[in-house]
Amino acid sequence: MQEELEEYLKNIPHLVHSDLLNTISYKGEWKGRPLIVVKSGVGKVNAAMATQYLISHFPLSAVISQGVAGAVHPALNIGDIVLGESHVQHDLNVTALGFRKGEIPYSAVHDFPGDPVLLEKAKKACEKLGFSYMAGRIISGDQFISDSETIRQLSREFSAHAVDMEMAAIAQVCHINRMPFLSAKAISDRADRMAHTDFPKFLQSSAKKSFQLVEELLSSL
C-alpha cells in the first residue's frame, strides 16, 4: 500500500520511479546496495505477479517483504513485529479431496519457510532497535479478517501468529525460484471487530516500524 511505500520515499534519496508490470516501483541505492522498492498492490495475485517479475528480470540476492498485518497470537500487541518462519495460505481449502487446509494439491506442500539466515539477522535487528517481536507463522488469504471467532479458528487450524493478504504468495514464488525470502510485519490491528477502525488508525505508525526494521537489517547484510 502507499502508506507502506511512503517511508522509503521519505528516507531514501534519489529513488528513480519506474513501472514494472502493473506495479509502482522505484530503483536506487541504499546502505551501499542496489535496491528495488515495489508496491505490488493488495492480494495474493498482485503479490505473486510482482515477485515473479522481479525475480525474472533482476539479479536479486533476496526478497524482503514488509508492512502491516493483523495479530492472531493473543500475546501480540499493536506495533509488535512478526517475523515469518513459515507462510501458509489459509483460504486454500481442498479438504474435500483429503488434503490439509492450506496444502497445495498434488504438491505435498503446506507451508513455505523464511530464509533462516535473514530471519536470525532480523531478530538481532529487532533486539538492537528494542522492538517487541515474535517469530512464527504468517497466514495469508484474500480476505480482510475482522472477526474474533474467525481469528480463534485460524489460530486453532494453523497455529499462526499473524494474518495478512500477501505473504504466503510471495513466499511460494520465492520458494519455487530458490530465492532467499524474509517477511517482517508490524501489527496494525488484532483482526477482531475493531480491526476496521484500528487498521487505519495504526497503519502509518506500524508501517514506519517495519521500515525501521528493514533499514537496520540492510545495515547488517
Image (tube, grey):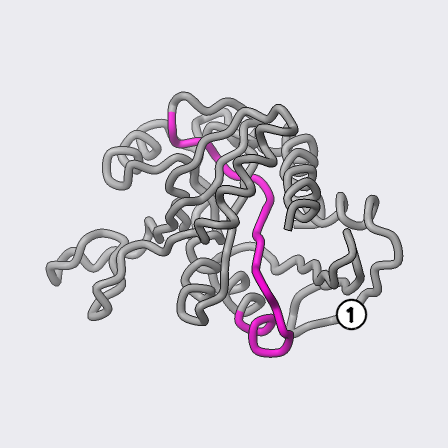
Which residue was labeled with disc 1? 18
Give the x, y percent position of residue 20. Answer: 68, 72
In the rendered view, tell whether residue 18 sits above or below residue 132. below
Q: Which residue lies furthest to the right in this view?
A: 14
Tell whether 73 sits left or right of 30.
left
Tell whether 179 sits left or right of 19.
left
Depth order, front residue of 157/114: 114
Give the x, y percent position of residue 95. Answer: 16, 56
Residues packed near mark 1 inside 10 Å, few (<14), some (14 to 19) or many (20 plus): few
Name the residue located 65 percent from the left edge and 70 percent from the top edge: 22
Give the x, y percent position of residue 61. Answer: 59, 65
Give, as a single range, the part of the protein colored magenta.
Answer: 52-73
Depth order, front residue of 102/37: 37
Three-letter residue code for mark 1: Ser
In the rendered image, residue 197 lying in the magenta stretch gets the answer no
Name the residue located 47 percent from the left edge and 64 percent from the top edge: 174
In the rendered image, residue 54 lying in the magenta stretch gets the answer yes
Picture quarter containing residue 168?
Answer: bottom left
